Image (cartoon, coloured by chain):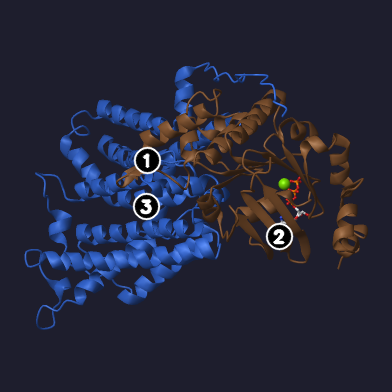
Chain colours: A brown, B blue
Amino acid sequence: MSVTPLLEARGIDKRFGPVQVLKDVDLTVTPGEVTALVGDNGAGKSTLVKCISGIYPIDAGEFLFDGQPVTIHGPRDAAGLGIEVVYQDLALCDNLDIVQNMFLGRERRSGLVLDEPTMEQMAAETLAGLSVRTVKSLRQHVSSLSGGQRQTVAIAKAVLWNSKVVILDEPTAALGVAQTAQVLELVRRLADRGLAVVLISHNMNDVFAVSDRIAALYLGQMVAQVKTTDVTHAQVVELITAGRSGDLGLAAEKIDNGVEYADTLTTPGAEQ
Amino acid sequence: MTQTKPTADTESQEPVTPSVPFVRALLRNPTMVTFAVLLAIIAAFSILAPDTFTQRSNFTQLAQNVAILTVVSVGTTFVIITAGVDLSIPSGIVLGEVFAVHALKLIGTGGDTTAADVTADQTKAWYILVALAGALLAGLIIGTINGLVVAYLKVPPLLATLGTLGAGLGAALILQNGVNTATYALDPLGHGSWIAAVPNLIPIALVVVVAGFILLHMAVFGRHTFAIGSNPEAARRAGINVERHLLKVYIIGGVSAGFAGFLSVAYFSTTSIGGHSTDNLQAITAVALGGTSLFGGVGSIIGTLIGVWIPAVLKNGFVITGVQPYWQDVAVGLVLIVAVWFDQLRRRTRNRG
Ligand SMILES: Nc1ncnc2c1ncn2[C@@H]1O[C@H](COP(=O)(O)OP(=O)(O)OP(=O)(O)O)[C@@H](O)[C@H]1O
Ligand SMILES: [Mg+2]
């Protein structure tokens, strides 16, 4: 089953001053699939996401959406394409309620004033469509919600807009067992509805539970993008920690691309 | 593909069972606290001075007295909800007065006289509008400077507006050579009543309150104001231009001060360049009393309205009951501390979740 990719990142470079955080990163995201983006702390996962959503400008590379080159200058551009991000820190407004958060920046109006009934109804429908039953009132302030509920609101916010790509940065990191299961179930449901989902996670059980593909970042380089069914836990862990595993990862790439990678990788401490 | 098992359908999150429901409800809604305080004060003075305090004319007088403070407090509410503060209100008001008078002086009325010199029955509606334009311009200038410095130069609002406070008052003194200008050109506005026996300042302040209420609580603008005060980064990621919005908020603060200056000239028939030095603290007190959090993200126009009335009613009641009116300052200070303490309590109970 080879579906055409919906979002493609090609040769993304990103540096913060002298520090090169992303180096020639490729990523392909396919509708109906969960792509797990894995990598050690500081590998560049969140940075890649922020490049995709236009929060950080990229230094080199390009994005293709539906096969067309696109430029993304900010969250609004990304949202315009149907790309929604649920950030690691969630970025919800504690003092606003669930509906207000879900519509923040894209409020519905009737005339000059806010159209609260419509927004409340749309929020309710979205949450119901995701089979979310755990929130008591849509007019609850977000600060009164549990971690899992906050995550749920952030995800519902992302899918409210007929989005096509949903990127979730460590959505289960702070959650307990039951809440993690709920969020993962939700993630799976998004893909089953035909969305392209990118899931960042450090938890291999989660990754293997829901993902169709795994993309591994190692020190800012994409070392492998493979089908989940083709690899084992151990292989993925190796890719994350060493950048290679058997004929997967950097060793294999080095054959294709020459010594370029080997330089930076064998001497990670001795950069300029 | 592996499907995760839904292990729990409902989360074990019981609503906090209120031990004392009434107190809980009060804690949750700061506006109710101050409203209860206001009602208690009114009730107390109604019992102590039933004949004088409860007279309709007394309340009309009170409403007229607080009208100007109400106008600036509405603007200040917006600023404080963004977790900012505007200390420059006195300079906005005084420059508003000065610009209004100078605008009138631009209109020649033959000979050496200008529109600033006309008597109350010689004045024309368009003179008043020109004075209004002048006052609003002054507020716009102060507000724009505040907004640019706070939003784009990232200078802390306390210091940015402290700077424009001093600079604005200085500029007003320069423009006036240090003396006030009297004018009766605005008297029909400041002393008239369009509605039977209701001084004009009251409906004008009411219009400002209603406009502020709609803008803050019913429009996109207000929603974004709360969002920025609550979590600026979240607002930015939601595609809100945080800097531009902050600029607009400080312009609202400045323009409301300029408008208050216009009303002040109309009411007192003179500029009062030394007469507004504590208006900023009064407005901030009113806003904080009304439950608007100085940490941003929380607040209401209705609360501010109540917060404006508490000091005014206290002072009025003390005068009527023969208590030294200075007790008002003591009482307001104490009420303010209690109100802010309640705000803290409320935050703590909420953040426990
Ligand atoms: N704004 C920034 N300025 C400078 N360096 C940054 C910035 N953001 C990230 N970095 C650096 O870029 C690298 C990648 O960070 P990033 O947050 O993308 O990692 P991550 O893969 O998301 O890690 P984690 O799993 O801990 O979330 C880190 O070394 C980090 O210190
Ligand atoms: Mg990260």
Residue at screen point 20% across, 44% down: B61
**Residue with the mark numbered 1:** B307
Q: Are marks 1 and 3 on the same chain?
A: yes
**Front in this rendered view, residue B98 or A149:** A149
> Which chain is home to disc 2?
A
Please provide percent x and percent y for residue B214.
32, 44
> Which chain is home to disc 1?
B
Q: Are marks 1 and 2 on the same chain?
A: no
Whether residue B261 can be seen here: yes
Q: Which mark is residue B134?
A: none
Whether residue B273 can be seen here: no
Q: Going by the image, does A260 lie left or right of A101?
A: right
Please provide percent x and percent y for residue A109.
35, 44
Q: Secondary structure at mark 3?
A: helix
Other residues around mark 2 within 10 Å, as few (<14) / some (14–19) / many (≥20): many
Residue at screen point 55% across, 59% down: B156
- Camera-near label (1 vs 3) is 3
**Residue with the mark numbered 3:** B75
**Residue with the mark numbered 2:** A12
Quadrant of the drawing holding the N terminus of chain B: top right
Please provide percent x and percent y for residue B10.
60, 19
